[in-house]
Image (tube, rainbow, N blue to C red):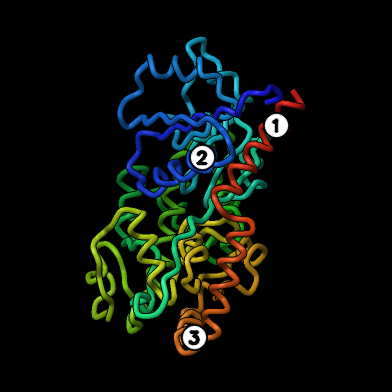
Amino acid sequence: MEDARPPRVALIKGACNYDHLRCFVDAMKMAFEDEGCVAVELDLAKGADPRLVEALSRFEPDLVLSFNLDGAELRAPDGGPLGGAPLTSWMVDEPYYQSAWASALRAPHVRTVWTNDRSTAEARAMGLPHAETVPLAGRVLPRVRGADRDLEVFFAGSIQDPEPMAAGWSRSIGPGVAELMRQACERWESDLTRPLRDVFRESCAEAGVGAHQALQRLEAMTLGPMNRFVRARRRLAVLRALSDLPLTVVGDGWDRLVPGARWRTRPAVPYYVYEEMVSRAKVTLCVQPVHAHGASERYFASLANGSALVVNENAWLASEYPGAHAPFAIDDPDAARARIEALLADEAAREAMVEAARARTLEAHTWGHRARQLLARVARISRAA
């Protein structure tokens, strides 16, 4: 990007129904345009028309920002990366656990991985030597004050029953592997800061499953389901312990999994409505058991918009938002309760916390910051080429 023309950015939405991440692509497009870039968007949910892909390559983007695997695999008509640009790939959930993701991302033109729950160190351990992970960001909405802040506690997340997940492992993968998975999950739950891949390999070694190719095949089938199982089980345990609190929750299944809860239930909503609901809450509760190192999009909805964030301990938040959130130990729901009740009872302390969080977001964690970070990284790669 040494010439005089404005930087050119291509943003690709994968054919996926992850509503919140599709919204983030829109947010990034506006952020790049605010930085003086020419930004175009391709939505693969409407079909990957070869003519559009060819036109996108002729556009010669300096940066391709892709969300989802089908976008990461797009190539120019000659088989190379679109426009010869370094490819920035945006991930969701547990990308390094999925063999197809990891394979696509080992290409030399993939240099930056966006993720909401994994670290740069883990990306490199999974065979992505050039990866530099970048957290998500916050969209700062107009302040909500006074009577308009009409929700006491908003739960940021969904609920799932973990047991049918585990029951399905025997049918889909086999009873022997299912038992290995159960053992690895129990081992991982004793220390969720460890990489699940390492924990699973220990369980396999004890069972005599050690061949490299066999392990690779097992990891591709098992790591994602184990991640989701542990996340669902630990989250459900916390929420059952807090069933008497005045939570507002979104989606269905709550009455079945947490019978007798005093919660207000709202139907599932688009992500932009979800953000607005968070901005109306005095306190937001977030339970992300397997996100010990990363920055979930659920954090930013609260941090950017004046809702005090009560969340299980997280190394990234401790570093980036010290004193601007209320952490609790994942195995101590009573600590979460104490945090919530204290914040509801002390408006001055709550306001001080949310003002500090909003200020920190505006200082370093808006979509504009992410656009500038990515443009600077592309410039460094171009200079080194």
Task: Name the quadrant of the N terminus.
Answer: top right
User: Could you tell me how many numbered marks the image carries?
Assistant: 3
Which mark lies nearer to you, 2 or 3? 3
- Expressed as whole percent of the image width and height from the top left, the position of residue 160 reads 32, 61
- Asked if residue 165 shows in the view, the reply is yes
What residue appears at the point 65 percent right and 43 percent down from the top-left corner?
Answer: 373
Mark 2 vs 3, N-terminal side: 2
Q: Residues within 10 Å of mark 2 (few under 14, many from 20)?
A: many
Q: CA distance from mark 2 to mark 1?
A: 19 Å
Q: Is residue 327 left or right of residue 175?
A: right
For numbered disc 3, what is the local secondary structure? helix
Residue type at tag 1 = Ala
> In the image as oriented, which residue stretches furthest toward the right?
384
For numbered disc 1, what is the local secondary structure? helix
- Expressed as whole percent of the image width and height from the top left, the position of residue 86 reads 61, 27
For numbered disc 2, what is the local secondary structure? strand
Q: Nearer the viewer, residue 212 or 58?
A: 58
> In the image as oriented, which residue stretches furthest toward the bottom?
345
When asked about the image quadrant of residue 280, the answer is bottom left
322 vs 15: above or below? below
Q: Which mark is residue 379?
A: 1
What residue appears at the point 51 percent right and 72 percent down from the top-left corner?
Answer: 330
- Expressed as whole percent of the image width and height from the top left, the position of residue 265 reads 25, 70
- Expressed as whole percent of the image width and height from the top left, the position of residue 273 reads 33, 58
Q: Which mark is residue 347?
A: 3
Residue type at tag 2 = Trp
Q: CA distance from mark 2 to mark 3?
A: 38 Å
Which mark lies nearer to you, 2 or 1? 1
Q: Which mark is residue 90?
A: 2
Residue type at tag 3 = Glu
